[in-house]
Amino acid sequence: MKRRSFLKGAAWAVAGAAAAPLLSSCVREKGSPDLGVAGDFHFGPGGSFKLLQFTDTHYIAGDPRSERALRCAEEMIETERPDLIIHTGDIVFGRPDIESAMEILRPLAESGIPWAVALGNHDSQFGSTREDMFAAIRELPGCVNLPPKDGVYGCSNDVITLSGAGGPEHVFYLFDSMDAVILKGEEEIHCYDYIRHNQIAWYRAHSERFTRENGGVPVPSMAFFHIPLCELSEALAAGILPLSGTNGEPPCPSRLNSGLFAQFREMGDVKAIVTGHDHDCDYVLDYGQIHFIYGRFSGGDTIYNHLGPNGYILSDTHTAPGTVSGCRVFQFNEGERGFRTWVRLCGGAVQQQLDL
């Protein structure tokens, strides 16, 4: 059985057993739109700002296969010294799940650097509800995530701004792409969840406000979440090639398309969609005037990862212990609408230096 098929089967076995109560616990009572931001950050003295993305740490407390993930987190933070860290999910991959999250997020909490998470599908599959996991994470020092929003599906939906002298110059949206969903009439078939309409409405309310306050000009924005969108598969099927990086496996989005990509295009602000989820991918691809960007696998050996130190695939039949983990980094300069991105590997190597 191929590694990805096995992983999916294992995930559905866990999610299917508890999907109904798990998902319903994250549906909140409808209320007034929450337009608060989790943090408003500013450029440093040199007019720059650095954001570091971790993804798919898949940590299990007490499991020696996780040790490399912890070393990776410590090394990446020490090497890059970012101004903000975002973890795009699949923080843990086993029991005890909350203890596992506390351990792998400890380097972030002890760094003195503000950080936030967008939960992944595995972060509510090992005993704790999604809300309990998120509440425990929010208690850690440095976490800027706000409590779940009334009327917005999921837990880790947040907005972070990066401001210059004249106000926000970049906006970072964090979405909870959830876990799995069971479709009526297809109970025997499970699929990854999707970003819901009330999450889209929440995003649009923020986007409209930022555009209005910016004199009618959309503020350049990025969307961070775990599970990629269907449009990435569409782009690859159309023959569009990555600008850089490794495409080691097909994307695994939801079967359902809620129209988030169309809303990004309509609002005209989101210029990049940054995800994880597919461990053998770390590429950047342009489609529909939006950059689709994978983070670099940041985990250890608890789950598959075949990306070698030079970005190539080491094996398609088994996990290769010691394959190089890392992170993706974004750099923003005051007064510039674009950004620079690169992949930093454990051991110090830098790949994919791109100006976008």
Image (cartoon, rainbow, N blue to C red):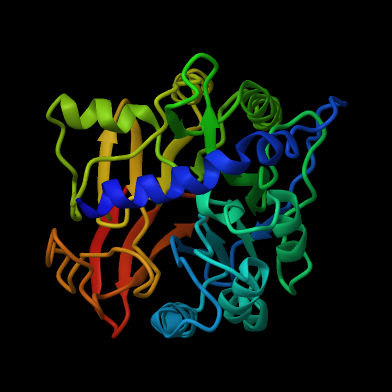
Estimate the x, y position of residue 73 in percent, counting from the top left: 47, 78
141 or 6, nearer to the observer: 6
Is 317 placed above or below 322 here? above
At horizontal 49% and vertical 71% (from top left) the residue drawn is: 59
Estimate the x, y position of residue 9 in percent, counting from the top left: 37, 45
Is 326 placed above or below 75 here? above
Estimate the x, y position of residue 44 in percent, counting from the top left: 59, 69
| Residue 179 visible somewhere in the drawing | no
Left or right of 7 on screen, residue 73 = right
Q: How many marks?
A: 0
Is 284 placed above or below 35 here? below
Left or right of 236 on screen, residue 102 = right
Q: Residue furthest top?
A: 185
| Residue 83 visible somewhere in the drawing | yes
Is 340 placed above or below 318 here? above
45 or 284, nearer to the observer: 284
At horizontal 79% and vertical 28% (from top left) the residue drawn is: 151
Estimate the x, y position of residue 123 in percent, counting from the top left: 57, 55
Left or right of 230 on screen, residue 187 = right
At horizontal 65% and vertical 58% (from top left) the residue drawn is: 127
